[in-house]
Amino acid sequence: MRAFVALARTGNFTLAAQTLHVTQSALSGLIKELEQTLDARVVDRSTRRIGLTDIGRELLPLFSQIIDDLDGALANVADHTRLKKGVVRIAAPQLMACTLLPPSIAAYRAQHPEIVVRLADTEVEGVITRVLSGEADVGIGPERTPAPPLLARELFSMPFALVFPHEHPLAALERVTWQDAAAYPFISLQGQFTELLLDAVPPSRTGIALSPAHEVTFMTTALAMVSAGLGVTVCLPYAAPLATLYGLTMRPLDAPTLQRRFFVYTRPGRSLSPAAESYVEFLFAYVKRAQAEG
């Protein structure tokens, strides 16, 4: 097709061969192959300047469009693989979406400004739903029980920390335990978060009566309530910037030390786009670097 279009546009075997960077005999062979495939003549060779047959004139705009579309598609693929373009759709819990992820996205965009990264902040349960439905290429969230039908790569594991106002009595303690936390109104998140804590710190085994005084949907609400003096809460260290913004103190929790694992979730049987794969690998390196820097 390329040989035919070049020949039709130049009207000359020599010029067409030069355009395609092939020999004149190779070009002639390609035209013969095309005519044999079609079982029809596409050019008349009766004069020094070739002319198109009726079939050739019909095929020229069709072949030209096919070649243009193909070249455009190949260029588009090349742009994606060279990360010159692309879209990454991420779903993450609201707290992570307003603490850890924005600076990681900014750092990634500094390296790949042509890539569009779209972040959907949602409740924890919504992360899995968005990935399963295809609304998000990648989901980032805590370990779920039971495990969702997704591919999961552990991104990091962090211990819970207690959050309270700067002037709170707990600030005077050198070491803060779950028993210390249980002495104050506890603000927890609804759903599996509270279940996780109660399973990890059962009163029958630990003697710690951790009964939520308030249950809210988002950790930002819990932090705001702690800032207003309504109780204490627990969250993960990646939320430290937000705790600071609310004027709160964050301290490690002991006896016991509880870890929560976070994963990158993707759909099985579906390859990530080059852009999404690139961002995921960047995020793993970004988190590893952040943990090394403390």
Image (cartoon, grey):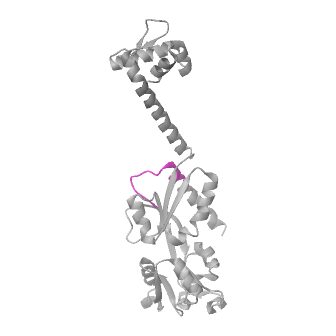
Question: Which x, y percent locates residue 115?
Answer: 56, 51
Question: Which x, y percent locates residue 233?
Answer: 54, 84
Q: Residue at x 39, y 16 (%)?
A: 42
Question: Which x, y percent locates residue 83?
Answer: 56, 47
| 28, 43: nearer the viewer | 43
Q: Is residue 114 above or below residue 130?
A: above
Q: Which residues are magenta?
A: 265-278
| 285, 106: nearer the viewer | 106
Q: Quadrant of the N terminus?
A: top left
Q: Residue at x 50, y 73 (%)?
A: 260
Queried whether the magenta region covers residue 267, the answer comes back as yes
Image quadrant where residue 226 sits: bottom right
Queried whether the magenta region covers residue 167, the answer comes back as no
Q: Look at the image and tell me whether residue 109 can be seen.
A: yes
Q: How many marks?
A: 0
Q: Quadrant of the C terminus?
A: bottom right
Residue lying farthest to the left in this orientation: 39
- Residue 163 is left or right of residue 45, and the answer is right
Q: Residue at x 50, y 13 (%)?
A: 13
Q: Look at the image and tell me whether residue 150 can be seen.
A: no
| 116, 244: nearer the viewer | 116
Question: Which x, y percent locates residue 161?
Answer: 57, 80
